[in-house]
Image (spheres, rainbow, N blue to C red):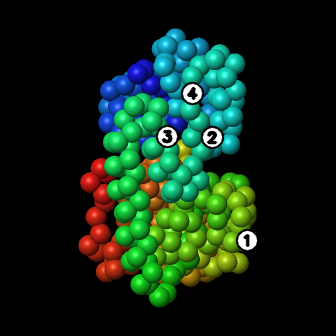
Amino acid sequence: MRLISICPSNTELVAYLGLTDQLVGVDDYSDWPSSVKDLPQLGPDLSINMDALEALQPDLVLASLSVPGMEKNIEALKERNIPHIIFNANSLEEIAQDLLTLGKACQVEEQAKTIAEEYMHSIEKMYSIAQTIPKKPTLYWEWWPNPIFTPGKINWLTEISALAGGINLFQDVELASVHTDWTDVVKRQPDYIMMAWVGVAFERIQPANLLKRPYAKELHAIQSEQLHVMEEWLYCRPSPRLIEGAIKLGKILHPKEYEQIKPPSFL
């Protein structure tokens, strides 16, 4: 099949199913595996060049609704009658379902089933460790600094936090993404601050910017030196790579408890 992915997490799903050689185009932000950077790039995931996409004559386009604004890509695909699948996972289990859906569409169902099972087994193994940890720290995840956005309860980072023996600071808000402000963050007094700005190069995320905010240096997380810059590609994309991120997080929060755990073989 001639596949096109217009979202980084979808490109990663393709790779885990061993279908990278069927990709004929990707969005500008798809960067893993590194070989996809040699493919035609069709623009940022919020503004795909549909003329260029259509010219590649795809059999199937892997679209997404993981970021607000992607709806216009879906509308354009429908208008042009281009075959597509829409992925919009908010939970770890839904990511497993996405693997199965893609596997069925690309006729590699057994491969998808094997990987999905291994992926879910890794999640269960981490949960079993987390249940043995009596004191779980609170984590403030910052997705975007101005205005501030952070994941709420209906988001994989609430699950990732729990897998690693922590608690998402905003898990009480029944949303996938929460628009809040710094005053609210200060009031909640997080034990850890995790900066993972979506769409910003890792090296450009500067903790010094956060430290300039009112009362930042009075926070417990800052005083205990628990401000971390985290990789967007391990925490902000709904793909199986989140498990790699969860393991890394577990070793930050509880190094002794998670010392022996390793990523599943397909990672």
Q: Which residue is mark 1?
A: 183
Q: Residue 64 location, x and y as percent? A: 58, 38
Residue 248 appears in view:
no
Look at label 2 and name its amino acid: Leu
Look at label 3 and name its amino acid: Thr
Q: Which residue is mark 4?
A: 84
User: Circle 1 — which element?
Assistant: helix
Residue 96 appears in view:
yes
For marks 1 and 2, give the CA distance: 30 Å
Look at label 4 and name its amino acid: His
For marks 4 and 3, give the CA distance: 12 Å
User: Circle 2 — which element?
Assistant: loop
Residue at far top of view: 55
* Picture quadrant where residue 144 is located: bottom right
- 4 and 3 marks in contact (CB < 8 Å): no
Residue at far bottom of view: 134
Q: Residue at x 43, y 72 (%)?
A: 127
In this view of the protein, which residue sits in the foreground, 132 or 9?
132
For marks 1 and 4, give the CA distance: 42 Å
- 1 and 2 marks in contact (CB < 8 Å): no
User: Circle 3 — which element?
Assistant: helix
For marks 1 and 3, give the CA distance: 42 Å
Q: Which residue is mark 3?
A: 101
Position of 116 compared to 235: left or right?
A: left
In this view of the protein, which residue sits in the foreground, 234 or 154?
154
